[in-house]
Image (tube, rainbow, N blue to C red):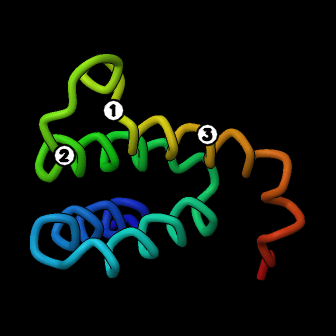
């Protein structure tokens, strides 16, 4: 099995079964570790769908967690070469 697919499955199970203070750092580490880990946006959307509060207004149109994940991925694009260590 591909490592990336395994990471997505582990994160999916972590989102469903673990508390937020465990799966949020895992999601952030996966965004740093895997290049172009755009699956994080979908996983963040899943977090908002499962655990999001009943917030009205703009939050109904745009998932706050997915928005933050998108911003982090965009910021990490130029920084990734400095952060990652290629082995």
Q: Mark 2 and mark 1 in contact? Answer it, CB < 8 Å.
A: yes
The image position of residue 63, as x and y in percent, is: 33, 32
Considering the numbered disc 3 on the image, is that residue within a helix, a strand or a loop? helix
Q: Give the Cα separation between the discs numbered 3 and 1.
A: 12 Å
Compare residues 49 and 59 and report the one nearer the observer: 59
Q: Nearer the viewer, mark 3 or mark 2?
A: 2
Q: Give the Cα separation between the discs numbered 2 and 1.
A: 9 Å
Looking at the rendered image, the quarter that the C terminus falls into is bottom right
Q: Which residue is mark 1?
A: 63
Q: Residue furthest right?
A: 82
The image position of residue 30, as x and y in percent, is: 50, 66
Q: Which mark is residue 52?
A: 2
Q: Residue at x 18, y 46 (%)?
A: 52
The image position of residue 46, as x and y in percent, is: 21, 45
Q: Which residue is mark 3?
A: 71
Q: Give the Cα separation between the discs numbered 3 and 2.
A: 19 Å
State which tag comes first along the sequence, 3 or 2.
2
């Amino acid at each position: 099995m591909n490592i990336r697919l395994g990471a997505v499955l582990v994160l999916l199970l972590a989102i469903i079964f673990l508390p937020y203070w465990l799966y949020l750092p895992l999601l952030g580490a996966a965004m740093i570790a895997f290049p172009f880990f755009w699956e994080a946006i979908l996983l963040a959307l899943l977090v908002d769908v499962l655990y999001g509060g009943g917030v009205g207004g703009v939050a109904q149109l745009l998932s706050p967690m997915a928005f933050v994940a998108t911003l982090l991925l965009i910021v990490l694009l130029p920084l990734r070469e400095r952060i990652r260590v290629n082995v």
